[in-house]
Image (cartoon, helix red, strand yellow):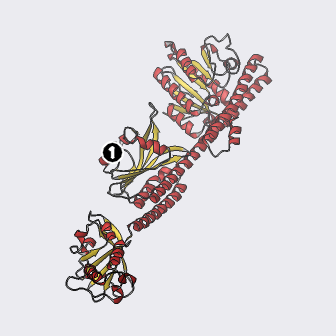
């Protein structure tokens, strides 16, 4: 092979032995290399071993790691001297030796397992262990699939959340009032997202200052407690005073807020610490284009990773709740319109009719002075004018609040 | 027979339900019965102008000397305050509840007015000019004020013209409800 021929044979042999010792020594014996191997520069072996995109480990029959490549060291965050010749495979897997994992045939057996890093954190890995026949050595190939597993978990969690949302949407549609279904909906979301607590807050306006306040309405927690929020101080809490003034800006703009105790601002962090919360996701609820409030998800466990997919899904949940509230508000507005129309249009017209009949009777009897008849007629004309004005006002009030009414109709209703 | 149960020294707040076709007669019956008890009447009228109404009373044999009017509609309809009704008040606009409150306060400030009944004719007519919410607040205010002063009040309602929610709220405000349309003067509730 070209590589062999290009070098001084003696130097090459010596170097090869040194490398072979590093690569293939099992302590006592040098392992013979095949004729094909002798033609490859050991530097190349070293380079290929170290440059592999997968973690590679060579271990002896006692599962002691005698060689580990750079990728493996980066993956596990150990130094080379902490691994080679001193570390047992079982130390990073929490038990078990390589012999039990090894495949003797040609087909590789890939196993998924969790490996513990030096700092105590874990990686998900696809591990293949092969034996080197007659050498008592194992070659272990380790592929980091942590990201892939997280994506799979996130997708699974998204599916679970979507299923909860789907059920929730159906129930909201069937319920006469969203308040009747909201606790059950929060419970489903709490279970689906596996968070500690889910809660719903509505915005109210401070009658004196005009400031937007948050008012706790309903909640549910993992322990199975929940219902209407009755805590007095949560019935009108200022965003500013709660240390989350920035939330108000973001939520009003339709942005979801994510906060983790590790990078929260001081006042926000104090709040989270007081509540024992590690991370929180706050999703705004908009009703008919106006910011109505928010739904919050508190996580008390450390290291909860929220993916964009999950957060988007929570946005869908907030959308469903917003739609249910909007539908109910629309129905209530329509009922109020019909009632007010009856009170201020239909019934006054009936009253007008009765009054005109009385005037007619007075005229027919001829006993009421003309001036008084005229005064009565003037009042009824004024009343008729007012009734027409009432109709215009009622139509305008409906048109103002309904974005779905086309502009041309809106103008017509306001005339 | 006393339908309202209003007597001197026994003030009551009554919601009088009337049929649409007999609202004017119901008004007349209240005035007649209250005056028969020796009680003066303050008529708050949003349905008919005060002058023709006074003529209607006289035509039906009632001495209008003891009757004062707070007229919410004459001026609004372009008319003037009649010179022969100096003790009555004519408001500029029927939706001016502040003006109405002041007028009622002014007209009741004399201690002799303790022996008085305020008749509001009618809540239905007021609904032409005011929202149900505003009317409810005003009636609540007026009923409370009359109770404090020990003065009777009668609010005429054309029953078919009021929605159940507003009717139940008005019922809660008053001492009793009398349905002249269906029971011919039988009291349906005693607070």
Above or below B128: residue A307:
below
Callout 1 secondary element: helix
Res A369 visible: no
Check disc 1 and report the residue beneath it. Answer: A271
- Residues A81 and A205: in front is A81
Where residue A41 appears, x then y in whole percent?
Answer: 34, 80
Where residue B177 sits, quadrant-wise, is top right
Q: Residue at x 75, y 19 (%)?
A: A368
- Residues A353 and B133: in front is B133
Above or below A282: residue B181:
above
Where residue B68 sits, quadrant-wise, is top right
B64 lies left or right of A139:
right
Picture mark count: 1
A129 lies left or right of A294:
left
Where residue A106 appears, x then y in whole percent?
Answer: 38, 87
Mark 1 burial class by Cα count in 10 Å: few <14, some 14-19, many 20+: some
- Residues A348 and A7: in front is A7
A255 lies left or right of A240:
right
Where residue B122 sits, quadrant-wise, is top right
Q: Quadrant of the N terminus of chain A?
A: bottom left
Res A194 visible: yes
- The chain that hosts pointer 1 is A
Where residue B121 appears, x then y in whole percent?
Answer: 62, 26
Where residue A402 appears, x then y in whole percent?
Answer: 62, 43
Above or below B170: residue A331:
below
- Which residue in the rendered view is the most extreme toward the front? A8
Above or below A289: residue B101:
above
Q: Quadrant of the C terminus of chain A?
A: top right
């Amino acid at each position: 092979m070209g590589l062999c021929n290009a070098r001084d044979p003696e130097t090459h042999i010596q170097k090869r032995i040194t490398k072979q010792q590093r690569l293939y020594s099992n302590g006592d014996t040098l392992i013979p290399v095949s004729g094909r191997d002798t033609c490859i520069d050991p530097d190349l072996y070293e380079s290929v071993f170290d440059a592999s995109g997968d973690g590679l480990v060579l271990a002896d029959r006692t599962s002691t790691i005698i060689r580990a490549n750079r990728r493996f060291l980066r993956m596990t965050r150990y130094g080379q001297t902490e691994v080679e010749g001193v570390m047992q495979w079982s130390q990073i897997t929490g038990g078990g030796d390589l012999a039990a994992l090894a495949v003797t045939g040609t087909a590789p057996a890939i196993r998924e397992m969790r490996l513990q890093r030096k700092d105590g954190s874990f990686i998900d890995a696809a591990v293949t262990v092969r034996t080197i026949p007659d050498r008592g050595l194992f070659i272990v190939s380790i592929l980091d699939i942590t990201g892939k597993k997280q994506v799979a978990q996130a997708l699974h969690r998204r599916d679970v959340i979507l299923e909860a949302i789907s059920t929730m949407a159906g129930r909201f549609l069937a319920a006469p009032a969203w308040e009747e279904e909201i606790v059950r909906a929060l419970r489903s979301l709490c279970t689906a997202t596996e968070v500690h607590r889910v809660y719903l807050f509505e915005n109210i306006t401070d009658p004196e200052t005009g400031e937007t306040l948050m008012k706790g309405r309903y909640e549910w927690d993992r322990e199975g407690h929940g219902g209407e929020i009755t805590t007095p101080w949560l019935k009108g809490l200022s965003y500013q005073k709660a240390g989350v003034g920035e939330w108000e800006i973001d939520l009003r703009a339709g942005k979801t807020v994510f906060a983790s105790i590790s990078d929260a601002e001081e006042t926000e962090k104090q709040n989270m610490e007081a509540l024992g919360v590690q991370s929180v996701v706050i999703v705004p609820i908009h009703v008919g284009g106006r910011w109505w409030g928010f739904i919050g998800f508190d996580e008390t466990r450390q290291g909860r990773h929220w993916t964009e997919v999950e957060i988007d899904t929570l946005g869908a949940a907030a959308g469903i709740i917003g739609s249910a509230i909007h539908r109910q508000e629309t129905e209530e507005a329509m009922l109020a319109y019909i009632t007010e129309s009856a009170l201020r249009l239909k019934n006054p017209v009936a009253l007008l009719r009765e009054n005109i009949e009385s005037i007619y009777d007075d005229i027919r009897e001829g006993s009421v002075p003309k001036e008084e008849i005229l005064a009565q007629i003037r009042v009824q004309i004024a009343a008729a004018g007012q009734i027409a004005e009432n109709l215009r006002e009622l139509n305008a009030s409906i048109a103002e609040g309904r974005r779905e009414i086309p502009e041309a109709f809106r103008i017509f209703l306001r005339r | 027979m006393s339908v309202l149960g209003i007597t001197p020294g026994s003030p009551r707040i009554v919601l009088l339900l009337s049929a649409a076709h007999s609202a004017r007669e119901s008004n007349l019956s209240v005035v007649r019965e209250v005056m028969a008890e020796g009680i003066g009447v303050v008529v708050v009228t949003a349905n008919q102008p005060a002058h023709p109404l006074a003529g209607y009373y006289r035509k039906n044999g009632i001495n209008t000397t003891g009757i004062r009017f707070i007229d919410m509609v004459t001026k609004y309809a372009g008319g003037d305050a009649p010179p022969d009704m100096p003790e009555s008040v004519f408001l500029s606009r029927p939706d001016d509840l502040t003006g109405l409150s002041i007028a009622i306060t002014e007209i009741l400030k004399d201690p002799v007015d303790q022996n008085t009944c305020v008749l509001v004719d009618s809540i239905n007519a007021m609904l032409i000019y005011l929202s149900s919410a505003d009317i409810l607040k005003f009636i609540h205010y007026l009923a409370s004020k009359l109770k404090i002063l020990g003065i009777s009040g009668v609010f005429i309602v054309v029953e078919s013209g009021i929605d159940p929610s507003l009717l139940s709220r008005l019922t809660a405000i008053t001492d009793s409800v009398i349905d002249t349309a269906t029971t011919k003067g039988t009291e349906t509730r005693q607070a």
